[in-house]
Image (cartoon, grey):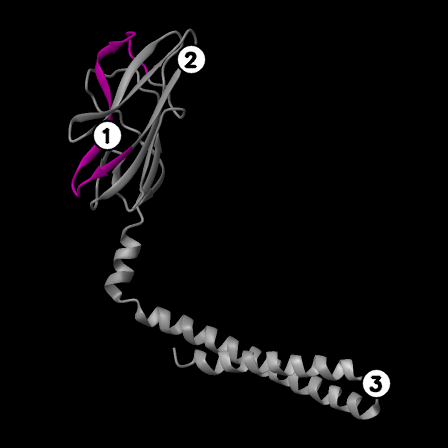
Amino acid sequence: MDAKIPFAFQLSFIGFCLMISFTYIQMGDCAEVSNTKNELAEDIFSTLQSLRSEVQSLKAQIAVEGERNISPEERRVSKKKRVAFYARVSPSITKIAAEDTIVFSLVETNSGEAYNPSTGEFKVPFAGTYVFFSNILSGSGKFIETCLKVNGKIRMLMYSGGKYWGSGSNMAVLELKAGDIVNIAKKGPWGTPPLYIHHLWSTFSGFLLY
């Protein structure tokens, strides 16, 4: 804080110098006044150059102090809390039973490594508010019902189907605890057999909001 006092004082000094300069300019064009104006201009320019150097120095000092004040634990937690994932079905799923977990095996993003592409489950690394989105594309002329579950309990529903290809999507914002398990699953037996989930267009994603 002490380093900012001379800086504010010098800004006030510049304003004072500018006011004096403007006064002299209004007095006329005599040689003496002209010389005075030139001297003031040089003084002001010199002061501005000095202040510019001081500002750059203060910026560097603040940046260093800011980095210094971040504890190793804060750095570790900040980096650790980068949680986000995005995965797609690949290849298409042609056999799935009621309540089975849908496995999105093609991972595009997995910051924090909380999503398991082998099981299709996202394990909450720490408590917070999370956002999840999923899109399921059914087969042509077929329909299928799916859902998002947290620890086996349904928290979001989706319906996919249509005369031709039909997709269903939904988003959920959930407050979760560390260790909670989130997954997309087939909801009950409902759907047109043989049940089918098309690859690539069927996705599952999520991230830590705060």
Q: How far apart are marks 1 and 3 (CA)?
A: 82 Å
Residue type at mark 2 is Trp
**Magenta residues, dominant SS class:** strand
Near mark 3 (Cα within 10 A), the count class, few <14, some 14-19 or many ≥20, is few
Say left or right for 96 vs 165. Answer: left
The numbered mark, 1 or 2, whose residue comes first in the sequence reads 2
Q: Is mark 2 on a helix, strand or loop?
A: loop
User: Magenta segment range?
Assistant: 173-196
Q: Which of the numbered marks, if any, corresponds to residue 183?
A: 1
Residue 5, compared with residue 185, is above or below; it is below
Q: Residue at x 33, y 39 (%)?
A: 85
Q: Are marks 1 and 3 in contact (CB under 8 Å)?
A: no
Q: Does the magenta stretch include residue 155?
A: no
In percent of width and height, residue 95 lies at 26, 15
Report which quarter residue 1 is drawn in. bottom left
Q: Residue at x 23, y 63 (%)?
A: 73
Q: What element carries label 1?
A: strand
Q: Which residue is drawn at 25% across and 56% down?
A: 77
Residue type at mark 3 is Asp
Visible residue check, residue 39: yes
Mark 2, residue position: 165
Q: Is mark 3 on a helix, strand or loop?
A: loop
| Residue 101 or residue 161, whichever sits in front | 161
In percent of width and height, residue 138 lies at 36, 15
Residue type at mark 1 is Asn
Mark 3, residue position: 29
Q: Which of the numbered marks, if any, corresponds to residue 158?
A: none
